[in-house]
Image (spheres, helix red, strand yellow):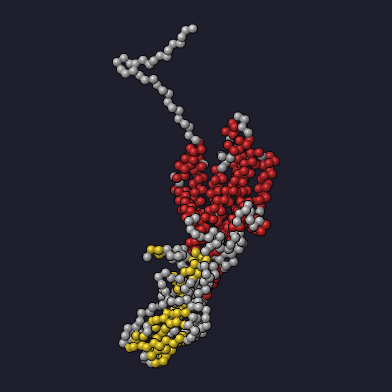
Amino acid sequence: MQAEAAAPTPASTPGGPPSLPTTPPKRQRRPNPRIAQAMRTWYFLRRNTLAMVGLGILLVLIALALYALTLPLSYSNLTPYCASSQSTPNSFPTTGPSTGTTVDVNFPNQLGGLTDGTYGFVVETSADYTPSPTQGTIRVDGAAVQVNVTFTAGGPGPVPVHFASSTPPGTGSVYAVTFVESGLAAGTPWSVSLNATSPSVCTPGFVSVCTYPGGSSSVGSSCYVTPAGDPSVIAPTAAWSPLGVGPLPLGSLTVNPGSPYFYNIWDGITRGADWSLLISASIVGSGALLGLLVGAIAGEFGGYVDEALMRLVDIFLSIPQLLLVIVVVATLTFAYPTIFGLPPLDSRILLLIFAFAVTWWPFYARIVRGQVLVVREQKFVEAARASGAGRGRIILRHVVPNSVFPVLVQMSLDVGTIPLFIGTLVFLGFGIFPTLYFPEWGSLSALSVGGGGTDTLTTFLTSCQLAAEGYGACVIPWWQLLFPGLTLFFYALSVNFLSDGLRDALDPRLRR
């Protein structure tokens, strides 16, 4: 047998270096089509300015939720606060003869007497007289108190200074305090300002905040002004000079005007970021998953399966959403206070998510069914059938991935509406949460305008109506209406901007 001829070696160019054998180029790896599609989507999404603004706002809210995880705030209830220093300065002007004129602070129409405690006072008169003492403290402890004030002519008047109570008053008997002057010319007016701190009614364990009423001097650098008669109405304590946030950066949430108890709006918004994002994502995600499954099966199988599933969708769509949520939460919470071995709080939230998901999936089912009816007639689906692929593989690998884009857009829209629905239920007075003052954005917004039977806003509006008629002062805590509303506004705005950008980025016909 003739031996095989050896492979020819590459000839070298005369007078030049020998040529090297050529090697075939390396075959490049084909990029993953899913990753390539995601990169194209991100490219078109980032070109949309409003979508980037929405994404930025949403990332800030997510960062707030992560920050809230590091704070020692309750997950089941807003932390209660109490105004611990409710000072009530009173001035008792009088005009008397040269000696012996008294100012009795036990007048029923003025202060009604003082309880046990230490109080500060300031004496004021014209610039022609200087009182002695000009200021000081008095101790009311089991007996009536008399303070003698001597005026000297020719000296400058005192600078008014209001003193804070050095010790909190107790709950003992009521005693009279009388100021007796001497040295004034007949007819010369003089007055006493008494810083009378009302008895402390704060329950032990409440977070205390020092307050003083408007129209009086501050009783301390860390005390905050409130309207007279409403110690719980505290404006935002954040300040630029000196720079600081104070105990209530966004102000107080008053739930009972006239009482010293309130809640911290900053605590509610911070802890509410956890619950609101979790509840919204869980409701929309579970509803979309169920609707995607039902819609894909109905659209792909058609016939009796399609008719049966669509009539089921029509039945659920005919039931009002809020009514169905109320019925599901009320019945299931009563029947199953704990499920899957979870604590009562987690069980209640899980039932709430289930109740909303039951009302949300029919919308997604209709969207997916319509999209599947279009996708299943495409050439690539027919090619998959011709190659022998099963119906399940066609649904999972071809139909569902190409029908999910409208669902993603609808999900991003629905996420922002969940807190609004929750706020509506809380405002109407339905107990969908384990506690009335649950830290969630929708619940917080409802409570800020008097939801849950508190009638807070009605009380404040009534005070303004009486003020217009000459009785009292108009008090409107704008911060507790503004900040929870702004939180919901920016949350809904961010997801709407982002959903518009996703729609444009996912649909080639809308790309610019």
Looking at this view, is 204 or 490 the one in front? Answer: 204
Give x and y (percent) for residue 479.
48, 64
Question: Can residue 88 be seen in the rendering of this structure?
Answer: no
Give x and y (percent) for residue 163.
41, 77
What is the count of numbered marks? 0
Q: Residue at x 37, y 83 (%)?
A: 134
Is 264 on the left or on the right of 326, as rendered?
Answer: left
Q: Is 334 rendered above or below residue 189?
A: above
Give x and y (percent) for residue 289.
59, 46
Give x and y (percent) for residue 244.
40, 63
Q: Is 208 rendered above or below residue 377?
A: below
Task: Report which quarter residue 27 is drawn in.
Answer: top left
Q: Residue at x 52, y 69 (%)?
A: 204
Q: Residue at x 38, y 16 (%)?
A: 10
Looking at this view, is 30 or 164 the one in front? Answer: 164
Question: Can residue 267 be seen in the rendering of this structure?
Answer: yes
Q: Residue at x 43, y 89 (%)?
A: 102
Residue at the outermost front position: 142
Looking at this view, is 494 or 133 the one in front? Answer: 133
Residue at the outermost left position: 15
Q: Is 21 rendered above or below residue 193?
A: above
